[in-house]
Amino acid sequence: MLIRRTPLVVVWALMLLPTAASAQTQQPGAPPSTVRFQSGPLFLNPMIGLTNIGIDDNVFNEPSTATPDSDFTMTVVPGVDLWLRFGPTWISTSAREDLVYYQKFESERSVNTNVRFNWTIPFNRLVVVPGFVYLNTSDRPGYEIDTRAQRVESGYTGTLELRVGSNTFLGVRGDHRTTDFEETAVYDGTNLRQELNRTVTTEGVTFRLQATPLTAFVFEVSAEQDRFEFSPDRDTDSTHFAGGLKFDPAALLKGSAVFGYRNFRPTAIDVPAYEGPTAAVDVSYVPQDSTKLTLLFGRDVQYSYDATQPYYLQSGVGGSIDQQIFGPVDVVGRISRQRLDYRDRVGVSVAAPERTDHVTSYGGGVGYRMARDLRIGFNIDKQRRESAVQARQYDGLRYGFAVTYGL
């Protein structure tokens, strides 16, 4: 396998920059005041992690009746968030690379690259932000597919936002992305390239009300077209209405909580439509330096690899608590529950009609913070999937150490 070395080299080179960054004014696209390093117009937050140093007792998510395989594993995670001031504009990049190692199973080793790029260009009352995204990974695509399938996801994005009042903004956005699985990516006898290669195009109109310097109300109406390269009978069109709150990273309450309604319309007459609520909540509350509470909640449509059940409605809730016990010692606990409601194609034989799978995970850990951004910890996590299809049920346990800087 060809290992792409550039992101790793960049991270370590940037970490050697000596000058600490000062607090920045909140210009569009500017770095946060918590940025760690500055050298002239360059600002950056480097990060490095050595995670999952331990045992995965079910490498392939096999059912317990199949005698699951275990292996020693670890992951090296270098990355950097970078901002570059270029005249009145800001260029921002987030780059991360996961180097995944398994001792016995070489097929599970991988180098996963994730890059995001944005260029924020202000014109008086108007702000334009073109960008692109790139993901080259062998990680699992989601809760359904258990194989680590090689794929590339890439695309370009663009937003345009106009200030129409002292604290109100109107905008438009566009997004064009492709998903391309490797030709040999197979799961459960299905070629993932044939079933899931697709292009997704999204256009939307946005409204933002900046209620306070740290809180904004956001609303969006968008149209989405999903076109499958080799399976046009999977094509869909959908309309999405959404609104909610976004919180500044400097606030006690961080993240966003957005709720909506999706009208999901497959073009094939034998695939049922979906009309209903959606949600995307990722909120953290930090009432004091020693405590952090996080709430996650999501609900939306996801594509299945199985042509007889071409999509499912995924609903999930989770949370975590991170508590400093004394001095540099902290503990963390986490739990999540996902529900996968499958939709059957009409008139075909389905192994488990109207199937609903559940995925539950929980775990925790203890850590020792050696410095503000350097932490050593021990983690243990348990995951279980329940399904009407016996071969889809599994239990898995992972435990081991982690050393992280800036993550």
Image (cartoon, rainbow, N blue to C red):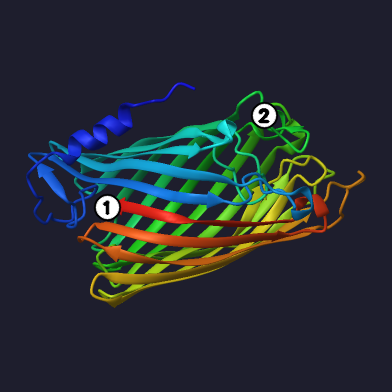
Three-letter amino acid code of the residue under disc 2: Arg
Residue 143 at x, y percent in the picture: 63, 51
Rendered view: 65 above or below 159: below
Q: Quadrant location of residue 133? A: top left
Rendered view: 59 above or below 376: above
Q: Which of 92 and 271 is in front in this view?
A: 92
Q: Which of marks 1 and 2 is in front?
A: 1
Rendered view: 63 above or below 336: above
**Residue 3 visible at all:** yes
Q: Quadrant location of residue 121? A: top left
Three-letter amino acid code of the residue under disc 1: Gly
Residue 311 at x, y percent in the picture: 72, 48
| Mark closest to the chain's N terminus, 1 or 2 | 2
Pointers 1 and 2 in contact (C-beta within 8 Å): no
Residue 48 at x, y percent in the picture: 30, 45
Task: Report, in whole angstroms, how far the alpha carbon at label 1 lies from the one at label 2.
Answer: 36 Å
Q: Nearer the viewer, residue 43 or 2?
A: 2
Q: Nearer the viewer, residue 274 or 114?
A: 114
Judged from the image, the secondary structure of the residue bearing numbered disc 1 is loop
Name the residue rendered at 80%, 50% in the picture. Answer: 391
Horizontal relation, residue 136 to residue 58: left or right: left
Residues packed near mark 2 inside 10 Å, few (<14), some (14 to 19) or many (20 plus): many
Residue 375 at x, y percent in the picture: 29, 58
Q: Which mark is residue 406?
A: 1
Name the residue rendered at 38%, 69% in the picture. Answer: 284
**Residue 179 visible at all:** no
Residue at label 2? 193
Name the residue rendered at 24%, 41% in the picture. Answer: 82
